Amino acid sequence: FGSVVSKLQGTQDATLSPYVNLSPKMRHAPYNFGKPSFLGFGHTPFMPSGDIVSDMTLQGVTVDRMASRKKLLASVDRFRRDIDKSGVMEGLDSFQSRAFEILTSNRLLDALDVSSEPTSIKERYGNGTEKEQGDAAPRLNQQFLLARRLIEAGVRVVTLSYSFWDWHGKNFDNAKANFPDFDQALSALIEDLDSRGMLDDTTVIAWGEFGRTPKINKDGGRDHWPNVSCALLAGGGMRTGQVIGATDRFGGEAANRPVTFQEVFSTLYHNLGINAATTTLADRTGRPHYLVDNAAQPIQELV
């Protein structure tokens, strides 16, 4: 999604990446995301993992020297571009150009530095824990604050991964540990965006890839259940404050108004001014691909 928005709408500022993925690298490989597919390397998300300051500081290199290196690199790239018709070089050019802009500006680095935030704001979001949860991500509440700062700076799409929800055992203990932190961080983000007049222009979504079994297993956990799931959406100028769709009394099957993943994606695109049912992107062979399946429409109850 972020790579598509990067491709279609680009960056609002040359010193910023249009798509930032705050997720750490997780031990369970399928949890990791952010590949641009055939859109090209230039639409890979910026991932500020590791030591942000040292990664983004010109260590003993002046801006003038950086400019000289950029000119040299451009001359080499012109030669390589003549022999590379796959589209990869175009992506690399875009990626390298953005990297130079980011390195010679403090705007992104400043957005990633939450130390300037008032203590009351940081306390509202909470801390969570830096300890890895299962084989997934820590509960880093400050990532929600980072997301707000990045959107405020002009980044179009920010994604993050929060905690570990694959509870095949000890469901109730895990819920008591995770939900209070998650509730604090998410509600703080929505409240913060609203107080700054940003909520109507920013869509917030929290969801997973599938639901959990309505029946508790022998280990006190809940297993994988693709039949029904849920998503929470806020902001984006939507008619929020409602529940759309319902399950049976066991929470196991959709009983009325089932909402598809494609409808949710179409809604997210719609909020950014993109008609997902008619917009296509060409792969490297020139074949067009629609953004959603079956011309899925935005959720009408929301838009």
Image: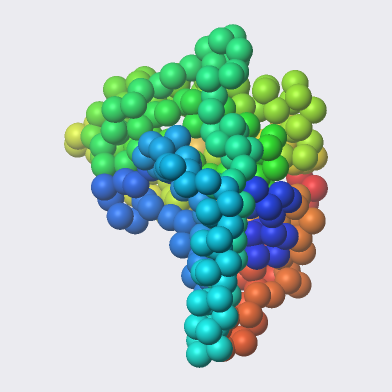
Q: In percent of the image, x 64 and y 59: which residue is there?
A: 6
The answer to whether 278 appears left or right of 67 in the picture is right
The answer to whether 249 appears left or right of 239 in the picture is left
Residue 284, given in percent of the width and then of the height, sits at 55, 83
The front one of 273 and 68 is 68
Q: Quadrant of residue 51?
A: top left
The answer to whether 279 appears left or right of 91 in the picture is right
Quarter of the image for the N terminus: give it.
bottom right
In the rendered image, the vertical position of residue 283 relative to residue 125, given as above or below: below
Q: Which colouring convention does the figure follow?
A: rainbow
State the count of labels.
0
The front one of 299 and 92 is 92
Residue 158, given in percent of the width and then of the height, sits at 58, 44
In the rendered image, the vertical position of residue 187 relative to residue 94, given as above or below: above
Residue 95, given in percent of the width and then of the height, sits at 55, 62
The front one of 244 and 95 is 95
Q: In percent of the image, x 43 and y 55: which residue is there?
A: 33
The front one of 105 and 135 is 105
- Evaluate whether residue 271 shows in this view: yes
The answer to whether 164 appears left or right of 187 in the picture is left
Q: In percent of the image, x 54 and y 24: which residue is there?
A: 114
In the rendered image, the vertical position of residue 222 relative to residue 96, given as above or below: above
- Evaluate whether residue 213 shows in this view: no
Residue 250, given in percent of the width and then of the height, sits at 45, 39
Q: In percent of the image, x 80 and y 48: which residue is there?
A: 303
Residue that lies at the very extreme toward the top in this rendered image: 120
Q: Quadrant of residue 219?
A: top left
